[in-house]
Image (cartoon, rainbow, N blue to C red):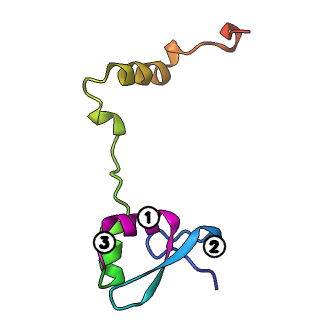
């Protein structure tokens, strides 16, 4: 039987560990979710509570939206996004 992270279902056993819920029940989690668990400082009562809090907290949106006034970030976005701005292989420095 393969163990998996109870939050993200990572199945590589080299990255798995256990944490305890409030009642002492051990829950298998990956290293990332273990770190999030300890940083949260919360003693979760149930696995469902832990999943709700530690689940995928990244937003599914374009990360450039918050760039706003960051001129360097905007230049990098333009340089890598616009095909006309890229160098051809014959233009490479030697």
Q: Residue at x 30, y 79 (%)?
A: 43
Name the element at disc 3: helix
Pick whichever of labels 2 and 1 is earlier in the sequence. Answer: 2
User: Which residue is identified by label 3?
Assistant: 52
User: Which residue is identified by label 1?
Assistant: 35
Q: Return the mark for residue 47.
A: none
Q: Mark 2 or mark 3, which is nearer to you?
A: 2
Residue 59 at x, y = what percent?
33, 51
Is residue 23 highlighted in magenta?
A: no
Residue 12 at x, y = what percent?
63, 69
Q: Return the mark for residue 13.
A: 2
Q: Mark 1 or mark 3, which is nearer to you?
A: 1
Q: Residue at x 69, y 9 (%)?
A: 93
Pick whichever of labels 1 and 3 is earlier in the sequence. Answer: 1
Is residue 31 highlighted in magenta?
A: yes
Q: Main secondary structure of the magenta part?
A: helix
Q: Mark 2 near mark 3, Cβ–Cβ under 8 Å?
A: no
Q: For mark 2, does the 10 Å Cα neighbourhood hold few (<14), some (14 to 19), or many (20 or more) residues?
A: few
Q: For mark 1, does the 10 Å Cα neighbourhood hold few (<14), some (14 to 19), or many (20 or more) residues?
A: few
Rounded to the nearest whole Å, what is the CA distance between mark 2 and mark 3?
Answer: 23 Å
Name the element at disc 2: helix
Residue 47 at x, y = what percent?
36, 82
Rounded to the nearest whole Å, what is the CA distance between mark 1 and mark 3?
Answer: 16 Å
């Amino acid at each position: 039987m393969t163990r998996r992270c109870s939050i993200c279902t990572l199945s590589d056993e080299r990255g798995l560990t256990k944490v305890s819920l409030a009642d002492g029940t051990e829950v298998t989690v990956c290293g990332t979710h273990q770190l999030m668990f300890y940083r949260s400082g919360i003693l979760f009562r149930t696995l469902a509570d832990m999943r709700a809090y530690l689940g995928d907290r990244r937003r599914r949106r374009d990360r450039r939206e918050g760039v706003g006034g960051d001129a360097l970030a905007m230049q990098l976005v333009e340089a890598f996004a616009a095909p006309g701005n890229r160098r051809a292989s014959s233009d490479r420095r030697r």
